[in-house]
Image (cartoon, grey):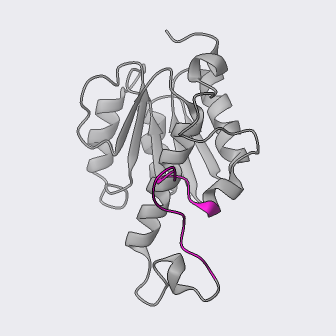
């Protein structure tokens, strides 16, 4: 089961995201600020971190500096989901402005986890589904969603929109307002 650390000072949004990612099959840990998040990283290594940038106590940039200083977790991918996501954030694997489509966020996180699993797989482990007997590779091409694999789509709740759809749940719909 992939693990995600969700770092956001907005309690309602953090709890909603935790529920969404848990329903999608993730082991979820949450933190209200960068300082709490660094303490979480001292306890366990997540597959991916979902990070807000504007938080009290320790903001996202200070958290990223602290993360880089910890060799055991320095390479953990970070997805920034922040109202300030218009600025470039060094060290971010992906960036989303708030509000954003939750289906797109889920798909991006699933793609990052899938890619990091392939990169970190032991040499004896198969690296693609085409190497496994009886398994078909994920659909690729026109109309295919490159971030949501058939396996990750099975783990998503039935009502989760794909990245391609125009209908979607946004952070503003989950949170009530973005501020």
Which quadrant of the view contains residue 175? top right
Residue 179 horizontal/vertical position (percent): 49, 9
Q: Nearer the viewer, residue 19 or 35?
A: 19
Q: In which quarter of the image is the N terminus?
A: bottom right
Compared across the picture, whether 41 is left or right of 18 comes to: left
Q: In this view, does 38 lie to the left or right of 162?
A: left
Residue 57 in the image: x percent, y percent? 41, 22
Residue lying at 53% horizontally and 46% vertically, measured from the top left: 107
Asked whether, in this view, residue 176 is left or right of residue 60, the answer is: right
Q: In this view, does 140 lie above or below 79?
A: below
Q: Position of residue 20 (x, y in %)?
A: 68, 38
Say whether residue 143 is magenta.
yes
**Residue 112 seen:** yes
Up the image or down, 171 lies above or below 146; here it is above
Seen in the picture, residue 7 relative to 118 is either above or below; the reply is: above
Residue at image coords 55%, 53%? 148
**Callout count:** 0
Residue 90: x percent and y percent? 23, 39
Q: Is the magenta stretch mostly helix, strand or loop?
A: loop
Q: Look at the image and say whether residue 173 sits in the magenta stretch.
A: no
Q: Is residue 1 visible?
A: no
- Residue extent of the magenta highlight: 135-151
């Amino acid at each position: 089961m992939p693990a995600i650390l969700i770092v956001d000072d907005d309690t309602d949004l953090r709890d909603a995201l935790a529920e969404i990612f848990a329903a999608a099959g993730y082991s979820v840990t949450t933190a209200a600020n960068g300082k709490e998040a660094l303490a979480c990283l001292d306890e366990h290594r997540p597959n991916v971190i979902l990070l807000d940038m504007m938080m009290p106590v320790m903001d996202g940039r200070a958290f990223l500096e602290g993360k880089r200083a910890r060799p055991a977790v320095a390479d953990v991918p970070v997805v920034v989901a922040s109202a300030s996501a218009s600025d470039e954030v060094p060290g971010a694997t992906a960036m989303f402005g708030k509000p954003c489509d939750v289906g797109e966020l889920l798909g991006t996180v699933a793609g990052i986890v899938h890619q990091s699993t392939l990169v970190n797989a032991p040499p004896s482990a198969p690296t693609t589904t085409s190497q496994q007997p009886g398994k078909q590779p994920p659909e690729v091409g026109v109309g295919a969603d490159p971030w949501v694999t058939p396996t990750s789509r099975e783990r998503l709740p039935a009502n989760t929109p794909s990245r391609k759809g125009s209908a979607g749940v946004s952070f503003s719909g989950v949170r009530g307002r973005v501020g």
